[in-house]
């Protein structure tokens, strides 16, 4: 009797364990698989670099504990510090030559990814970019380079999509009647977003334009530019900014009482960083920033597999940070690493000759992965703009909340057109 | 031209900010012959002092300004004793490497302690502007400009008429002869360095309500301050003030008429052009490099 009881208990435990495995759809990983993680961990870019590493770590732990590792193995990291382009190249070389990794992921900044991916190519190592948006990175015919995030042209594409499909009718104008002023800091990021937006706005929608006006993000005075813009009376300001110049512009625009009907930005800099809201509080109300999904995002709108991983990711972030609000660095790094897991599981190898066709064959619709992304890489190694669904967030009372596409969010865009400066409450 | 009043106001206010930073630099330049590449980092420290005093102690920046003078002077004195004193008689190469090293060390210290985030000291009156004749004056910038003029005048008077000022000028003109006359040149250098840091620390406090604060915030101002100091004539404070206004005028007019991307090219062309014609700067005397001469 006693033996029979123990048999039932043991069988029960085994059944529960198997059941858990079935629920997760995965078996526990055996052995280790190491990749290189290359981010700026010191210097000016360190805050974002560390956020990215944290995002990778959150997703790595999730992959190992709940999604069966990669290729059935436990995923582990060798981390390098890419403080500047020179260090990015030397660290990429070290990760490949000394740590023996076959895949390097990183480096978030457009100033770093070019150098890092070149060095990885020389070592015949796969370079898996998750954040940098410089379009040139995937235009060098390097077969080892892949990017999960959209590039700068994708940012411009989405911004114009938002202006044409949402702002135009809210402003009661045809797209061809809209006058867009283009203002941007002069890095490759700012220029690529601005130029792609200009091209699409003009060619597809016939929008009128003012500018473009480029400036160094370290500028000390934007008043002359604001005076010029004020004289042209644009409907919408398309402003790609870094952090200090976004703060300077907003203060000086208010001083000059510069009124536009909407301000549209793209990326996790400038208007897209929490620092902008901290700087101005409720006086920050109004500007839009194209980002990954933020507060208000309706997860139920994703496909079932996308919902599963998105929920798991959000729970893991909350467990780590105590916050429901996701950081852009977390989302980009984790989203990119998840796609790498899918690619490695499909390829079952890191041999570039077999890995590359497997990556190009991945075909997942929007809503299948973290951040609601889909996957379809082209021959250059760039994930499709249309698949990497992006969202427009707006500063509303101290928070960046998701406002577009409306079917994915509970929040709605406000202050269209923007009212007087002291009435945006 | 309806924007002309605003362009003139912008020039004056921006030039005032550059002059405020340049005045401390021209003092150390003129007396010690030391190019302080860490000048911008002491500016940044002044900005953080104002930021944290406001955020944690609720001190208005203009209250912090008063406190910043002795604090910055003490920091300057300590940095002279710890870093500059051993190399003040060394070659220019050694001085350059030392101050660049100090600059990098202070930047990275700020990064480690306070992160790279750009922050903003938002006072209740940050958006208050005075509108006169079609031009908007930011109150904080008016104060910065007025204090820049006052500081320049005060330092000029101090150097011209005070005993310590005369001693500093004597040391600047001939260090060895001054020592033979019984002047403690080491002490003069310590005072000069500390006064220079106190000036730039105060400038940092005044800039905090106007510009974002982050670890490399000083860099964007200090290059222009160097240009103003050299353009005005090494060690000439009134020259630095006028040169700062000239640089600001070129920046503002260039940004408005040609484009913001060109403004650095324009003021550096002006800089090169003037130095070709007058190698000692607008008001400097060739070979003198002395204060008040």
Image (cartoon, coloured by chain):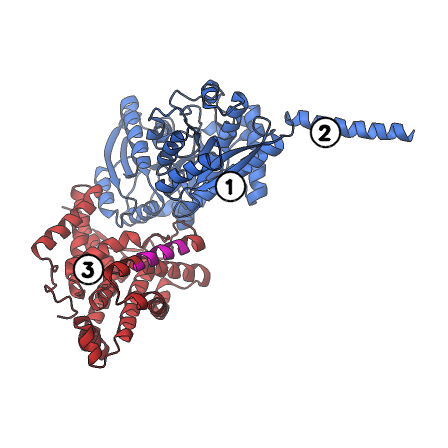
Chain colours: A blue, B red
Q: Judging from the image, what secondary structure is the residue with disc 1 in?
A: helix
Q: Which residue does the numbered mark 2 point to in the structure image? A: A17
Residue B70 point in image, percent of width and height: 35, 71
In this picture, is B249 found above or below A179?
below
Q: Chain of mark 2?
A: A
Disc 1 crowd, CA 10 A, few/some/many (<14, 14-19, 20+): some
Number of on-image labels: 3
User: Magenta span has A337?
Assistant: no
Considering every residue shown, the one lying at the far right of the view is: A1
- Res. A54 mark: 1
Considering every residue shown, the one lying at the far bottom of the view is: B182
Prevailing secondary structure class for the magenta stretch in the rendered image: helix
- Residue at image coords 41%, 56%: B109
Can I make out residue A275 in this image?
yes
Q: Which residue does the numbered mark 3 point to in the structure image? A: B229
- The alpha-carbon separation of the residues under discs 2 and 3 comes to 75 Å
Q: Which residues are magenta?
A: B98-109
Q: Chain of mark 3?
A: B
Which mark is first along the chain, 2 or 1?
A: 2
Please tell me if label 2 and label 3 are on a single chain.
no
Determine whether, in the image, residue A108 is placed left or right of residue A209: right
- The alpha-carbon separation of the residues under discs 1 and 3 comes to 45 Å
Front one among B249 and A59: A59
- Residue at image coords 15%, 52%: B271
- The alpha-carbon separation of the residues under discs 1 and 2 comes to 30 Å
Front one among A423 and A207: A207
């Amino acid at each position: 009797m006693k033996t029979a009881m123990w048999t039932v208990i043991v069988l029960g435990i085994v059944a529960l364990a198997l059941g858990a495995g079935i629920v997760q759809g995965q078996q526990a990983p055996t052995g280790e698989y190491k990749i290189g993680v290359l981010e700026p961990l010191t210097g000016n870019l360190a805050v974002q670099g560390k956020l990215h590493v944290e995002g990778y770590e959150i997703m790595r732990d999730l992959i190992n504990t709940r999604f069966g590792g990669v290729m059935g193995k436990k995923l582990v990291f060798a981390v390098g510090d890419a403080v500047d382009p020179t260090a990015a190249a030397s660290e990429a070389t070290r990760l490949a030559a000394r740590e023996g990794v076959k895949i390097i992921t990183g480096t978030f900044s457009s100033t770093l990814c070019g150098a890092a991916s070149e060095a990885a190519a020389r070592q015949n190592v796969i370079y898996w970019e998750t954040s940098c948006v410089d379009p040139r990175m995937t235009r060098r015919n390097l077969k080892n380079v892949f990017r999960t995030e959209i590039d700068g042209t994708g940012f411009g594409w989405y911004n114009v999509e938002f202006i044409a499909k949402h702002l135009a009718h809210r402003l009661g104008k045809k797209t061809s009647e809209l006058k867009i002023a283009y203002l941007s800091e002069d890095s490759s990021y700012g220029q690529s977003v601005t130029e792609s937006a200009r091209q699409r706005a003009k060619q597809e929608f016939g929008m009128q334009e003012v500018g473009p006006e480029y400036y160094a993000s370290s500028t000390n005075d934007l008043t002359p530019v604001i005076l010029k813009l004020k004289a042209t009376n644009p409907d919408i300001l398309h402003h790609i900014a870094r952090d200090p110049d976004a703060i300077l512009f907003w203060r000086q625009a208010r001083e000059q009482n510069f009124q536009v009907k909407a301000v549209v930005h793209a990326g996790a800099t400038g208007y897209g960083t929490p620092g902008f809201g901290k700087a101005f509080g409720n006086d920050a109300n109004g500007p839009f920033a194209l980002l990954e999904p933020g507060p208000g995002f309706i997860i139920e709108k994703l496909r079932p597999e996308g919902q599963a991983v998105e929920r798991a990711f959000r729970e893991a972030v909350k467990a780590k940070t105590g916050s429901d609000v996701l950081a852009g660095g977390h989302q980009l790094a984790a989203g990119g690493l998840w796609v790498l897991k899918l690619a490695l599981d499909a390829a079952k190898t890191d041999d570039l000759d077999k890995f590359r066709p497997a990556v190009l064959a991945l075909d997942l619709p929007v809503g299948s992965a973290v951040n609601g992304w889909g996957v379809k890489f082209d021959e250059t190694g760039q994930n499709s703009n249309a698949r990497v669904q992006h969202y427009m967030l707006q500063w509303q009372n101290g928070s960046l909340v998701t406002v577009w596409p409306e079917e994915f969010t509970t929040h709605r865009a406000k202050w269209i057109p923007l009212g007087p400066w002291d009435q945006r409450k | 031209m309806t924007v002309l009043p605003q362009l003139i106001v912008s020039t004056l206010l921006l030039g005032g900010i550059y002059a405020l930073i340049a005045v401390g630099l021209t003092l150390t330049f003129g007396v010690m012959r030391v190019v302080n590449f860490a000048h911008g980092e002491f500016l940044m420290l002044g900005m953080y002092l104002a930021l944290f005093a406001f955020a944690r102690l609720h001190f208005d920046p203009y209250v912090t300004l008063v406190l910043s003078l002795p604090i910055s002077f003490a920091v300057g004195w300590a940095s002279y004793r710890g870093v500059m004193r051993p190399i003040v008689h060394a070659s220019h190469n050694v001085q350059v490497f030392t101050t660049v090293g100090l600059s990098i060390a202070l930047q990275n210290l700020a990064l480690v302690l306070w992160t790279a985030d750009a922050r903003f000291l938002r006072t209740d009156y940050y958006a208050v502007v005075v509108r006169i004749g079609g031009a908007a004056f930011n109150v904080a910038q008016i104060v910065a400009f007025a204090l820049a003029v006052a500081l320049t005048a005060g330092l000029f008077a101090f150097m011209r008429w005070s005993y310590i000022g005369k001693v500093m000028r004597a040391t600047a003109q001939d260090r060895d002869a001054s020592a033979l006359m019984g002047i403690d040149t080491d002490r003069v250098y310590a005072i000069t360095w500390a006064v220079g840091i106190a000036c730039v620390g105060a400038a940092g406090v005044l800039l905090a309500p106007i510009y974002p604060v982050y670890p490399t915030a000083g860099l964007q101002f200090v290059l222009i301050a160097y240009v103003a100091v050299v353009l005005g004539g090494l060690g000439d404070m009134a020259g630095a003030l006028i040169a700062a206004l000239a640089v600001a005028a070129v920046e503002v007019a260039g940004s408005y008429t040609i484009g913001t991307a060109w403004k650095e090219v324009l003021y550096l062309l002006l800089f090169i052009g003037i130095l070709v014609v007058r190698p000692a700067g607008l008001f400097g005397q060739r070979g003198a490099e002395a204060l008040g001469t």
